[in-house]
Image (cartoon, rainbow, N blue to C red):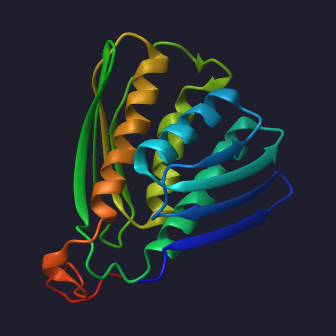
């Protein structure tokens, strides 16, 4: 079976983003965006999803930088997953991190949709505006063409809440993109197509 990989490059007047993604990796990563907290969250996605990821991004404005990385990563995910034949398709994960508990559910069903229940106490999580966590997830879901529901069930530390969410996303995506040997070669849809 061929590896599910993708390379996406995006150059705008505001950002430059280069992403390499291997869905069948080992969690190896090289991530540099200029935002330390964002790099930290993306490394959680790679490591706990067992995705090999290279992300090199630059941009002066954190909003555009995070958004464009999400767009590119979503496109890379959609490209790498291909026709979705034989995958589990739907999955969820509940991840604790000290005081925080996060739930993420995904459906790699061809339609981008995002629902969240995430509250952060502070305006920033280290050098990352806290509202960028939801914006990243929304932009990623749209471009990856998947349903993504994220909820912070509990937590008092914003860093822990964000990190638990990204770890839960990683675990849910890993589970949803795995191959189910019972449906090898089949599209996991009664329509027999996911587009």
Q: Nearer the viewer, residue 176 or 12?
A: 176
Q: Position of residue 67 (x, y in %)?
A: 63, 48
Q: Nearer the viewer, residue 18 or 43?
A: 43
Residue 1 as seen in the image, left or right of residue 188: right
Q: Nearer the viewer, residue 78 or 20?
A: 20
Residue 193 visible to the viewer: yes
Residue 120 visible to the viewer: no
Q: Is residue 41 above or below residue 186?
A: above
Measuring 69% from the left and 28% from the top, which residue is drawn there? Answer: 36
Q: Position of residue 91 (x, y in %)?
A: 23, 55
Measuring 34% from the left and 78% from the top, which residue is drawn there? Answer: 84
| Residue 63 found in image quarter | top right
Name the image quarter holding the C terminus. bottom left
Name the image quarter holding the N terminus. bottom left
Q: Is residue 166 above or below residue 180?
A: above
State the count of labels.
0
Q: Is residue 136 above or below residue 144?
A: above
Residue 170 as seen in the image, left or right of residue 85: right
Measuring 58% from the left and 62% from the top, which residue is drawn there? Answer: 21
Q: Is residue 26 above or below residue 166?
A: below
Measuring 78% from the left and 38% from the top, which residue is drawn there? Answer: 61
| Residue 156 found in image quarter | top left
Q: Position of residue 90 (x, y in %)?
A: 22, 61
Q: Position of residue 95 (x, y in %)?
A: 29, 31
Q: Which residue extends farthest right?
A: 13
């Amino acid at each position: 079976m061929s590896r599910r990989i993708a390379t996406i490059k995006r150059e705008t007047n505001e950002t430059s983003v280069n992403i390499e993604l291997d869905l069948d990796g080992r969690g190896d990563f090289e991530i540099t965006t200029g935002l330390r907290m964002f790099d930290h969250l993306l490394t959680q996605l790679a490591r706990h999803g067992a995705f090999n990821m290279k992300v090199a991004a630059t941009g002066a404005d954190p909003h555009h930088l995070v958004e464009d990385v999400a767009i590119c990563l979503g496109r890379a995910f959609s490209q790498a997953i291909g026709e979705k034949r034989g995958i589990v398709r739907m999955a969820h994960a509940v991840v604790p991190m000290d005081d925080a508990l996060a739930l993420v559910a995904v459906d790699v069903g061809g339609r981008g949709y995002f629902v969240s229940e995430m509250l952060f106490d502070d305006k920033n999580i280290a050098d990352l505006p806290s509202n960028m966590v939801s914006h990243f997830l929304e932009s990623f879901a749209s471009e990856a063409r998947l349903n993504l529901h994220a909820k912070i069930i509990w937590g008092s530390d914003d860093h822990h809440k964000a990190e638990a969410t990204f770890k839960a996303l990683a675990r849910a995506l890993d589970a949803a993109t795995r191959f189910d040997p019972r449906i090898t070669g089949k599209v996991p849809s009664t329509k027999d197509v996911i587009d």
